[in-house]
Image (cartoon, rainbow, N blue to C red):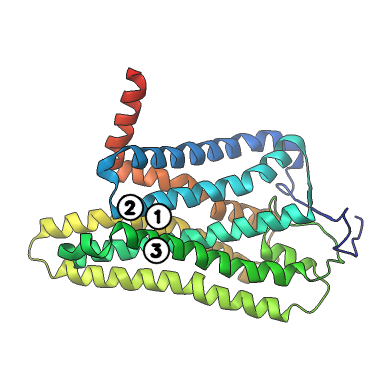
Amino acid sequence: MPEVTNTTQGSFYFILTGIPGFEASHIWISIPFCCLYTISIMGNTTILTVISKEPSLHQPMYLFLSMLALTDLGLTLTTLPTVMQLLWFNVHEISFEACFAQFFFLHGFSFMESSVLLAMSFDRYVAICCPLHYASILTGEVIGKIGLAITCRCVLAVLPSLFLLKRLPFCRSHLLSHSYCLHQDMIRLVCADIRVNSWYGFALVLLIIVMDPLLIVLSYTLILKSILGTASWTERFRALNNCLSHVLAVLVLYVPMVGVSMTHRFAKHASPLVHVIMANIYLLAPPVMNPIIYSVKTKQIRQGIFNLLFQRKVY
């Protein structure tokens, strides 16, 4: 394997890795990957189309759902080019600049997924605990500001880590462990002091990966307290059912995230295949499952999809 000693060279590139031990079967492995990417793109595009075309869905809950679908679509399109070109055409090389661009969007959309789910938990809290003030609190202007704040938060979170990493020399093997560019994968190839990068990464983990789930748990604690205070079991069931889709979306994101963290922490010497599978589940599960969850569990979305298909059939 050639060594690269200067990140300023125009020929600098990283080498992506497919599925370890199954390189000869990449063309067959590409079939389920292609299906998952297709489901994600079609599902999230359908959600966005339905919400945009149905005036009755121009409400806070569905506007936040459209943010989630847009984030999932961005996350899917970020990893799709390198994954599929590796599996289909055996293209392993990615340029220095392209890798950092993918790094920015991949981590940016991952953080955005967590931020949008946090905003959706706030929406559920207001809807259940302050129903009379729901429309006055979550106005279109407020939702727009929340969306802008989420975007700024994620961009400002990722940019420093990108510049901190980009300034460092890559003078070790440039072989990455995945078929896309991850920060934790790239930084192990650096041959310089990375303490600043490590401390910043730790701060990001605390501010986003830890704080967001804690705030979501807090919001649902308050929601449960409010629900249990209602007199009717029917009202309790209706309120819990309204939250079920969001709870499932939270689990789909954070369960694989915890699994990846546990694997990196306690299974460092496990087969590379284990790490690759866990990383792919973490990045593919939310974009694939979220449209399915909301289409199955949300009556208004189901009805909107039926209306969309019916109109297309008529025309």
Q: Badge 2: how crowded within 10 Å, few (<14), some, or many (20+)?
A: some
Question: Could you tell me if the residues under marks 2 and 1 are in contact, i.e. CB atoms within 8 Å?
Answer: yes
Is residue 83 in view from this perspective? yes
Question: Residue at label 1?
Answer: 249
Q: Which mark is residue 245?
A: 2
Image position of 164 (left or right of 33): right
Which residue is pictured at 24% across the width and 54% down the height? 242
Q: Earlier in the sequence, mark 1 or mark 3?
A: 3
Question: Residue at label 3?
Answer: 146
Amino acid type assigned to the residue bearing label 1 in the image: Ala
Residue ranking furthest to the top = 314
Which percent across, then down, holds residue 287?
A: 49, 48
> Which mark's residue is nearer the viewer, 3 or 2?
3
Compared to residue 132, the image places residue 296 above or below, namely above
Q: Quadrant of the C terminus?
A: top left
Is residue 262 in view from this perspective? no
Which residue is pictured at 66% across the width and 42% down the height? 81
